[in-house]
Image (tube, helix red, strand yellow):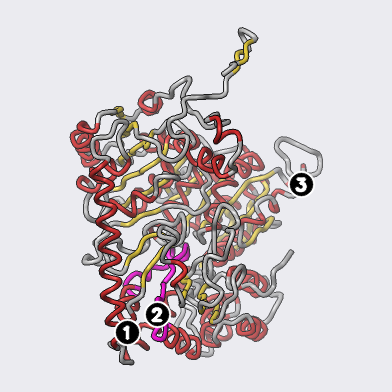
Amino acid sequence: MIRENSVFDLSRLYLDNKISRRSFVTRLTQAGISVSGAASIAQALGANDAAPALRTGGVHETGRVLENHTGGELMAEFLLDWQVPYVFGLAGSEEVGFLDALVDRTRLQYATCLHESAVMAMADGYSRSTGQTSIVQLHSVAGTAYALGQIAGSFRDNIPVVVVAGRQSTNFRGQDGFLEAANLHQLPQEYARWTWDLISAATIPEVMRRAFLLAEAPPGGPTFITISKDLLETKVRTAEILPRSRSRVATDVAPTEKHVQEIADTLLGAELPVLFLGNECIRYEISAEVAGIAEEVAALVMTAAKIPVVFPNTHPNYAGQFQDDRTVMPDIDAFWSLGAAMFKTSARPKEPLISRSATVMHTSLVRSEVGRNYPVDIASIASIKSTSSAVLDELRRRKTNSSAIKARRRWIQEYTEKRRRSIEHMAKSEWENQPIASSRLMSELDQRMAPDAFIVSEIVTNDRFIRQHLTFDHTRSFEQRRRNFDTVSRVLGWGVAASIGVKIGNPDKEVWCLTGDGSLNFGSQALWSAVRYEVPIGIIVFNNGQYQANRLNQNLYQGRMLETGKYIGVDLGHPDISYVKIAEAYGLEAERIEQPGDLAATLKRCQDAMSEGRPYLVDVRIGNWGAGSDSTWYDFFSIARNEVRKS
């Protein structure tokens, strides 16, 4: 079903020439985007329509016309013209025409893996860390189905990735041939900004351009194209590749002046304002603007659940993840969601998380999220970057040094200092724990990592230790401090592969991957790619021997599992899994540690290997937490002995 009022669907209709430029701008403004913002998007998308550009009198880069190239060669030449350096893929029979075109085009590097899920995650990590749209090549319905979980992750985080899947030849469709899927292009439709089944080899450059544009159009996300085998092998007499310079999409959609004024008024008039940062902050960096606003009006800064560290945790106004301290929540009377859903929780809260008497503000480019679950008093579909910048400018024009704001600054300083002391006290009390406490492991990593390291994390129930014990220093510029990458989707198997993509895109950065043992089991195939391409990353396995998230959720049911300590499908021991042997089987150096005193020396060996150009894995046995953490029960039966465990 077409959601015609959403930004990305309107962009698709405009590019497909189904609506005019005037209609496109009108519908965007009706959806809540400012006229200037709508016009900027239309200008960026309007490269198909040469007339408006020519009327400006400017000189524009011309396209390149190719003659007598196969469809696969056209696709490769398009990527070269658009300066796409890597193809993340897993080769198959339907994509031969494209793969053959890569042989003599050595500027296009083909990065492969042993599973399509890992291939998609590698591309995702590359794109979210560089801001550049990546391309993924998959094999038919099998490759698409394997990659679908990670496609959903890119969709949830608005990461621009173009996914291309081969399919049966056009003259063989309908005969239920090898891996045929009649509606393959529709398979990921719910998790793609645009899907298309290419029908002519001559249109490959045009369709590829459209796929890149719509992947980047606000709010951004994966697009999906299927191409029949014969179309990649067919010779095309002539085809034009339009230049990248005339195919850029504006994402800085400006808010209305009224919206800016209302936000400033609300923040200044509140008793306890909160700036709530969500997953749009993964793609759009606004920490400097948010810090400025928080300082001007004495607001707390909180992040949404399960998103990475998008705001420096050393800043005096930082109060951790929303719901970390439920005692402060009833006092919030002004709540501004900046690119955050309200709320991504595992279950419906018994009571509203934000008081119905609070003024709720919501700014986002994702129209479907604004006001979706909570009453909204001030809402706008706009860029969180341009909006936060405009609000900060407005606040600085006003007097923000009232006695009430001064008093709140003192309260916030005391509140956040108390919070930090509590975290430090807990870490000290666990310092000698065995199995090793996650707080100590993270503290030791904090001492070892470079101050500008890139940290890819997939430690589902231990992610709070990143926010609490790794230093993201607000006194350093964004470019000079550490960055954290994570995915809100929680589709396991993302972390290791994503860290490879992050390192490929940022070869000069020190890249660490923090992964749970359960997560690693979903994506261990990516280790092979790290060795093949000599990707020097440090992989730290937080090994607690179970799916801890499942145990914690089973406890919420308050049933027999909690009463008996018998948790179904949670235990990852019996037999124990040797992650060292798994790593060594793929060619990595690895070691396992269980003693807390061994951490410092082991992490140094890992870092030394990274500096010498080699990936390295450290398997750390950590402790569990929460009710049932001491349970040793596991579900068991023996087929060989026809035996069922009795206890």
Q: 10 Å neighbourhood of mark 2: few (<14), some, or many (≥20)?
A: some
What residue sits 47% from the left and 20% below the top?
575
Marks 2 and 3, the one that precedes in the sequence: 3
Q: Residue furthest front?
A: 563
Instruction: Give the x, y percent position of residue 249.
Output: 50, 73
Q: Residue tagged by mark 1?
A: 404
Q: Nearer the viewer, residue 267 or 580?
A: 267
Q: Nearer the viewer, residue 570 or 127?
A: 570
What residue sits 54% from the left and 67% below the top?
213
Q: Quadrant of the N terminus?
A: bottom right
Identify the amino acid type marked 3.
Ala
Q: Is residue 431 left or right of residue 330?
A: left
Identify the amino acid type marked 1.
Ala
Marks 3 and 1, the one that precedes in the sequence: 3
Query: What kind of element bears circle 3?
Result: loop
CA gap between label 2 and label 3 equals: 58 Å
Q: Can see residue 619? A: no
Identify the amino acid type marked 2.
Glu
CA gap between label 2 and label 1 equals: 8 Å
Q: Residue tagged by mark 3?
A: 182
Q: Can see residue 142? A: yes
Q: Which quarter of the figure has residue 412? A: bottom left
User: Residue 271's mark?
Assistant: 2
CA gap between label 3 and label 1 equals: 65 Å
Q: Is residue 141 left or right of residue 53?
A: right
Q: Nearer the viewer, residue 141 or 454?
A: 454
Q: Which residues are magenta?
A: 267-290
Instruction: Give the x, y percent position of residue 569.
Output: 56, 31
Q: How many marks?
A: 3
What residue sits 59% from the left and 51% below the top?
164
